[in-house]
Amino acid sequence: MKRLNSLLIDALTNISSRYFPIADFVSHDLPLTRLLRLSLFQVSVGMAIVLIYGTLNRVMIVELNVIASLVAVMVSLPLLFAPLRVLVGFRSDHYRSYLGWKRVPFLWFGTLIQFGGLAIMPFALILLSGDTHGPMWVGQLGAALAFLLTGIGLHTTQTSGLALATDLSAEEKRPRVVALLYVMLLLGMMISALCFGALLENFSQLRLIKVVQGAALLTMLINIFALWKQEARNPANTAKHLPRPKFLDAWQVFSRENRAKRYLIMVGLGTLAFSMQDILLEPYGGQILNLSVSATTMLTAILAAGTLCACVVAAHLLHRKTDPHRLAAAGILIGVFAFSCVIFAAPLHSALLFRFGTALIGFGGGLFAVGTLIEAMSMDKGGQTGLSLGAWGAVQATAAGTGVVLGGVIRDIFSGLAESGLLGPAMDSAVIGYSVVYHLEIALLFATLIVIGPMVNSRNEINEEKNVKFGLAEFPG
C-alpha cells in the first residue's frame, strides 16, 4: 500500500494542476488512498438519509398504508438528536481514554447505533402497517425507536468523522478535504437512491427487509473500513488526569463573538429556506405538472447533480479569493431565481422550466453549503474543531428538518383553505399550497442576505491576516 501511495503521488505531481484538480493535493502525510477511504463514512450517512427521507417515506405511505401524519412524526424523530451534535463534537475534542483515541470511539459507537436502528427498522415498519395480530402500539414504538437510533448514529458518525478529517489534514488543506467529504455525501445519496429504487421496483415486505438490513450490514462494513488505522493512538492527549473544560464554558467562548451568533443565524435561515421544498418537489411535479413516477424520481438526481456542479464552481471562485460569505450570498440569489422558475412552471405548464429550477435549487444550495462549511472551519479556536463543526451541523440539521415539517404543514393548510373556497374563487387551485411555500422560501432567502451583509467585511479583514487559499487546483476531485 505504501508503494502504491508513493507511485500515485509521483504520478499526480507530474500532472499540471490546471488539468487535474487533485494533482497538488495528495501528500505523503495524507495520501489519496487514505483520504478516500476515510471519506467513505459519508457514503453510509448518505445511504441512511436516502432511506429515512426518501425510500421509507414513500414505502410507508404508499405500500404499507401508514397514515401520512404518523409517517411525518417518524421521519422527524432523528431531528431530536440534531441539536446535540455540538455536544458530540465538544466531547470528541476532549475525550479521555486509556486507548489514546478521541474521534474513533465516537465513530465506532455512532456506527453501532446506526446499524441497530437500521436492523430493527423493517420489522417495526411491518408491525406499524397493521399486517400483524399484535397490538399496534408495539409497531409504533418499534418504528419510533428505529428511526431515533438511526438518526443518533447518523449525526454522531458525521460529526466525529468531519472532525477527524479536519485533524488529519494540514490547516491550509482542510477546506479541500471537507469539500471532498461533501461530494462523497452527495455521491452516496445518488448511488443509494438509484440502488434502492431498482431493488424495490417489485416491492414486497420480504424484499424491504432484505434491502434495509443489507443497508445496515453495508453501513457497518463501510465505516469499519473507513476508520481503520486513521487516527493514531496518543494516550498522552487522552489521559484521565488532563483537565477537561466544561461544555457551557467552551460554548460561551465560542459564541461570545457577534460573528459566531450571526453566522449560526445565517446558516439556520438559509438552510430553512432551501429545505422547505424537500418533500414538495416530487408531489408538485406529479400533482400540478402531471409528471410520471419515474419522471419525478429523477428530480432527486437532478437536484444532486446541480449541487455537485456547485462544488466545482465554488472551488474555482474560491481560488480567485472569493469571500465564502459572498459565495453563500451568490447561492442564495440563485435560489431566489430557482424558486421563481418552479413557481412559474405551473401557469406555463412547463416541465422543462420545472426541471431547470430544480437543478438551480441544488446549485444554489450547494454554493451556500460549501461557503458556510468553510466558514465553520475558520472559526475553530484552541482545538475546538469538533465544537465548531458540531455547531454548524446542529444548526443545519435542525433547520433542515424543521423546514421539511413546515413545508408539508403549510402546504396542507393552504391547500385545504383553497379547496374549501375560503381564499376566494381566484385561488381555488391545488397549486396554491405549493406556491405559498415557495414564496415563503424566497422571503427567507432575502432575510438570509440581510444577515450575511455585515459579515462580508469582517471576513475580508480576517482573510487579509491569514490569506488562506482554496481553489480548483486544491479541490480533491
Image: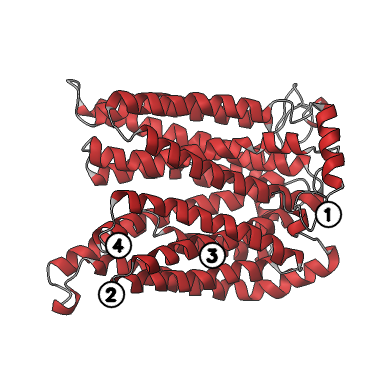
Callout 4: few (<14), some (14-19), or many (20+) C-alpha neighbours within 10 Å?
Answer: some
Q: Judge whether 143 appears above or below 260 on screen.
A: above
Three-letter code for the amino acid on which mark 3 is drawn: Gly
Q: Which residue is at the front of the view, 259 or 310?
A: 310
Whichever of labels 1 and 3 marks the residue nearer the N terminus, that label is 1
Q: Position of 144 compared to 195: left or right?
A: left
The residue depicted at 52 percent of the width and 59 percent of the height is: 306
* Residue drawn at the location 61% of the way across and 48% of the way down: 183
Q: What residue sits right under mark 1 in the picture?
A: 16
Q: Quadrant of residue 51?
A: top left
Q: Tell me the residue that label 2 is attached to.
A: 347
Amino acid tagged 2: Pro
Does residue 399 appear in the picture of this structure? no
Q: Mark 1 belongs to which amino acid?
A: Ser
Structural distance between the alpha carbons of marks 1 and 4: 52 Å
Q: In the rendered image, which quarter contains the N terminus?
A: top right
The residue identified by callout 3 is 364
Which element type, helix, strand or loop, lies under badge 4? Answer: helix
Q: Is residue 269 left or right of residue 173?
A: left
